Image (cartoon, grey):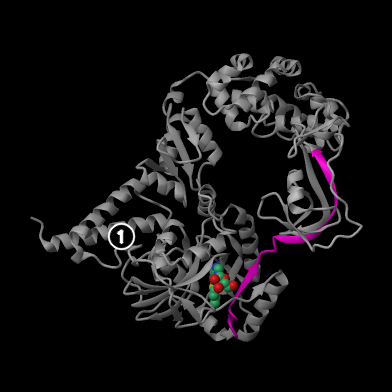
Amino acid sequence: MVSRASLKIKIEKLKEEINKHNYLYHSQDEPEITDVQFDLLFRDLQQLEIDNPEFLTSDSPTQRIGASPLKSHTKIVHDLPMLSLDNAFSEEDLADFEARICGRLKTKNIICYSCEPKIDGVAISLIYEDGKLVRGATRGDGTTGEDVTQNVRAIEAIPLRLCGTEYPRRLEVRGEVYFPRSAFKAANQLAVRLGERTFANPRNAAAGSLRQLDARLTAQRKLSMFCYSVGLVEGGSLPGKHSEILFKLKTWGLRVNPLVEVRAGVKGCVDFFGKILTKRAALDYDIDGVVFKVDRLDLQSELGFLSRTPRWAIAHKFPPEQGVSIVKDVAFQVGRTGALTPVARIEPVKIGGVTISNVTLHNMEEIARLNLMIGDNVLVHRAGDVIPKIVSVIGKGRSSNMHKIELPSSCPACGSTIINNDVIAKCTRGYECPDQRKENIRHFSSRLAMDIEGLGEKIIDQLIQTSLVKSPADLYKVSREQFSELDRLGPKSAENLISALAISKKTTLSKFIYSLGIEEVGEYTSSILARYFGALDPLREATIENLLAIPDIGPVVANNIHEFFREKDNQLLIDDLMELGIHWEIEESSKKNEVLQGEVWVLTGSLLNVTRNDAKLRLQALGAKVSSSVSSKTDCIVAGDSAGSKLMKAQSLNIRVIHEDELLDLFSKYYE
Ligand code: IVH
């Protein structure tokens, strides 16, 4: 018979262990156990608490979403107002900021700043008493916010209990709750599937999710948080530098942004700004700038506040990602398959440091959707490395200077007839059309295809113009001398190109199939075909029925493949390429292929040490089918960083979950 005392100890130990793993997972990004193991611990605790309700406490990890939905959020008044930040938009603004600081402090010494990404989320205040989370509140107007305690308790990245013991008796932590981009994407995909409204952007989604009256909805949204300062602190002391306080918060289990750095002077700050700008697109959360804070708290006190902003901090905002321009013309580009894509030539506009003068309009449907005319003023949006797009036409008025955008009646590159199926218009001349030729060569030589290093667009243009190259095979027939006669291509570059071409001849069957540019046969389908047929000849001879027998190949793709290999020109091209020495190792049905044969795998969340594409191709090479959605047929799910709804679904279906390190272990057994 277990005594009450030892039961209590057991429950406390379990809580501690669960808290530790929560901390390792959310704050350190270094989980020591799998999700399945974590769930077992969690269920053990749940059962013990059900059997012994007298030991259930409100800070138990099982109580994150214990309470019932609220009718409304109550208002709270912040002990210390939650302030705002002054903004800088240029290096001059930053120099002024520093001059003001040095002037006020009457110093010429170099000031050190805590440099931090400015998270684009929702400001939050958390109060911990004796290490226990007792209240969460939104910023509101800075003086009065809303009590969202139940909601913040539902966010797994926020500890219910602090680690260690040396925290102040009452500690107010401030920070930003955000929606990780990957979780946001997953939430929107789920909303589409369920026919629900999607969120406009991660910030709105975070704000909406945080203020849900039913905290169970908050829990489903997989929000996260970065802490960036403290508010009122009682019953304990903190270090004398902001950066040291952040470090303390981290040791207590609170999440602090890993990119925070202390830099010296405005020069250091400008450097940090540039560094973060280059990282911005790859982050799993939105940031709209960086924040610089005088690191020493004694200097902060001396500087004080100006109205509602501290004199000791400033936000250096990123350049706007939207700009206004005028559509000067619309050209139609001919793609590899002959499809005509309308491209708006706009008055050059600088957005986020990049000058944009061309914006793709995708197809005629998009033009109709925007109700776009040549001469319109438009709002252009550019986000990270995403292709810029026209968001809307500004001002509804129309004048006689504006022209309707019409689909050309013949191919702009070769003058051939256009066929039009409403959404996609196509040139019918095929390989004889110079633009299609160019695009084909570009595709053939691209990284995922034959990977011919150094064969850029300008060189391809010249090779086509001079008729040195008419088909991909011709690339291998151009001599060193002919290359070196091209514009801006000296003997050294010509030599490099010749060797890059020679290197490219050794490839893989999958890459070769991809390089052929068969309609709708991308990298994934190419890898399936390579694995299924193992050699080129059986693929060339495959009937539509043979192709349809392959999982993941539908009638349209089967038909495209079949047709491609029936075309005389294509047959000659392949023979030509083989004769020129393109080769690959025979893909035997080696042991590798059998390891995961017949299994269905799903990748979710962000992988840090392997690209998703590589992971997918490697899993396929081991015989697995990689699917994008979780179902009862899924055998295993790889949960990367910030995995969201797919992971939850997998857990509810009791599907095996592994983390990136286990995936890498698996790969290391089969790949060098
Ligand atoms: S410090 C008195 N640090 O930006 C200083 N704010 O425009 C208070 N924000 O309301 C803020 N990341 O919600 C600070 N690393 C960071 C931040 C940050 C995002 C938000 C915060 C604040 C707003 C001010």
Q: Nearer the viewer, residue 1 or 667?
A: 1
Q: Which residue is mark 1?
A: 62
For the view shown, which residue lies furthest in the right direction? 400
| Residue 281 makes an appearance in the image | yes
Position of residue 80 relative to residue 49, above or below, is: below
Q: Residue at x 41, y 62 (%)?
A: 155
Task: Tell which residue pokes out farthest to the left in this image.
Answer: 1
Position of 48 with respect to 555 (left or right) is: left
Q: Residue at x 42, y 31 (%)?
A: 599
Point out residue 525 in the picture as x, y percentages from the top left corner. Answer: 59, 29
Query: As displayed, is residue 508 above or below residue 153?
Result: above
Q: Position of residue 202 (x, y in %)?
A: 56, 59
What secondary structure is marked by label 1? helix
Q: Quadrant of ligand 1?
A: bottom right
Seen in the picture, residue 634 relative to 387 is either above or below; the reply is: above
Q: Nearer the viewer, residue 56 or 194?
A: 194
**Location of the N terminus (image quadrant):** bottom left
Residue 321 part of the magenta-drawn span: yes
Magenta-colored span: 307-333
Answer yes or no: disc 1 within 8 Å of ligand 1.
no
Q: Is residue 453 left or right of residue 345?
A: left
In reply to whether residue 482 is colored magenta, the answer given is no
Helix, strand or loop for the magenta stretch, by majority: strand
The picture places residue 521, in percent across and down from the top left corner, at: 64, 29
**Does residue 113 show up?**
no
